[in-house]
């Protein structure tokens, strides 16, 4: 039996040792946190934040129902690789995203990246227009810090939901110094894509995001990014576009070509106020005989015309299927019609010169 004084001394000693151990654990945790990158997740909705009626519901679900904090909590492993904070910028299915929301998102990204305590940003997004948002940001973000856009093809309630691993990989990528200076990236299905070149290529499968012609720029394996090629087209800090004072973007629309197409769509879009028009032509951006006069007239009336292709791969050759010099048209180079629209919108905030706009299409 211990004497009371001895018992008290031992109790005091044990108490001191416990507090010392607890302080050591707290210090170690703080030291670990200090070494981790600081990543902000900006949530916008989409399938990654969607829910279904059952665990086997992978189509017919409701998008944009789960908030950003729930997304983060669903992947506790993130806390081991980054100090993460989350913001709900908006909560929509991505087919409904607007030019105004693009501007809102881009301005928030630029504001955050200007802060020294933010090392990278992840944007959760619906897949339907993910490639467009990524390319828009690729042209207007003014930082070399990593910006990663991520989504999922299956809702958060699905038996095989791909959102959690995609989000984990995106956070790892955004916190990786090697990802800096590569432009806006898309992280899906263990692959890293450049925003300019990636597209959604399948309606429902998890491997839908592909850069079929030019290839992925990297992979993520075991949570670690591996890069294999550079992005040669100018982006982010090297672009001439400044959206800091913009409240709206010029109206630019897409007219789709097909067999026996007429001039109804072109005339309607011009009448609705289009300042620019992307013609998604067949083949090498060919101009159907019934559509050509409407496009020629639109250009004479001041609408900037860009010849693109619905094919999905390859360069639209200037003065190939049309005399672009004579018609004063612009060609889209390798940009898809939907991405050509984005570049033309931004170009029109700077100039209406087709010579200058063509330079931009060969630059970005």
Image (spheres, rainbow, N blue to C red):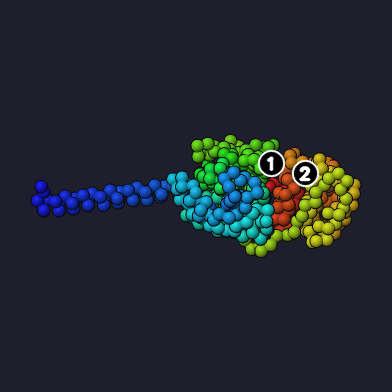
Give the image quarter of residue 251. Answer: bottom right
| 291 w.r.t. 207: above or below | below
Q: Whole-percent x and y of residue 11?
A: 18, 51
Q: Nearer the viewer, residue 284 or 265?
A: 265
Image point (41%, 50%), residue name: 34
In the rendered structure, the answer to whether residue 107 lies left or right of residue 290 reads left
Residue 148 visible to the viewer: no
Q: Earlier in the sequence, mark 2 or mark 1?
A: 1
The residue that label 2 is drawn on is 310
Disc on res. 340: none
Q: Nearer the viewer, residue 108 or 199?
A: 199
The residue that label 1 is drawn on is 201
Q: Whole-percent x and y of residue 261?
A: 86, 48
Mark 2: few/some/many CA within 10 Å (<14, 14-19, 20+): some
Q: Whole-percent x and y of residue 192?
A: 59, 41
Image point (41%, 49%), residue name: 33
Distance in Å between CA atoms under marks 2 and 1: 13 Å
**Disc 2 and disc 1 in contact, CB within 8 angstroms:** no
Mark 1: few/some/many CA within 10 Å (<14, 14-19, 20+): some
In the rendered structure, the answer to whether residue 249 lies left or right of residue 289 reads left
Secondary-structure class at tag 1: loop
Image point (75%, 39%), residue name: 314
């Amino acid at each position: 039996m211990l004497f009371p004084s001895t018992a008290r001394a031992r109790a005091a000693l044990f108490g001191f040792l416990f507090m010392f151990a607890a302080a050591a654990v707290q210090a170690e945790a703080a030291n670990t946190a200090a070494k981790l990158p600081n990543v902000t997740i900006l949530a916008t909705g989409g399938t990654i934040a969607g829910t279904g009626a059952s665990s086997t519901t992978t189509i017919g679900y409701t998008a944009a129902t789960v908030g950003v904090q729930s997304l983060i909590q669903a992947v506790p492993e993130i806390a081991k690789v980054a100090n993460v904070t989350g913001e709900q910028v908006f909560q929509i299915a991505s087919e409904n995203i607007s030019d105004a929301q693009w501007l809102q998102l881009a301005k928030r990204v630029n504001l955050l990246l200007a802060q020294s305590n933010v090392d990278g940003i992840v944007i959760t997004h619906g897949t339907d227009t993910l490639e467009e948002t990524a390319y828009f940001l690729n042209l207007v973000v003014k930082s070399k810090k990593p910006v990663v856009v991520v989504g999922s093809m299956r809702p958060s309630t699905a038996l095989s939901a791909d959102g959690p691993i995609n989000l984990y990989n995106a956070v790892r990528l955004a916190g990786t110094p090697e990802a800096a200076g590569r432009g806006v990236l898309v992280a899906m299905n263990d692959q890293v894509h450049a925003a300019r070149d990636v597209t959604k290529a399948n309606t429902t499968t998890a491997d839908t995001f592909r850069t079929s012609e030019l290839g992925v720029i990297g992979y993520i394996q075991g949570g670690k990014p591996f890069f294999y090629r550079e992005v040669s087209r100018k982006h982010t800090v090297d672009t001439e576009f400044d959206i800091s004072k913009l409240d709206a973007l010029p109206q630019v629309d897409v007219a789709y070509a097909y067999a026996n197409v007429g001039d109804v769509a072109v005339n309607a879009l011009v009448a609705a106020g289009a300042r620019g028009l992307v013609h998604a032509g067949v083949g090498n951006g060919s101009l159907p005989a019934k559509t050509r006069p409407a496009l020629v007239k639109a250009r004479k009336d001041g609408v900037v015309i860009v010849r693109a292709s619905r094919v999905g791969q390859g360069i639209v050759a200037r003065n190939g299927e049309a005399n672009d010099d004579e018609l004063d048209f612009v060609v889209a180079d390798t940009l898809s019609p939907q991405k050509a629209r984005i570049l033309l919108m931004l170009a029109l905030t700077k100039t209406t010169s087709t010579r200058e706009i063509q330079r931009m299409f060969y630059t970005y």
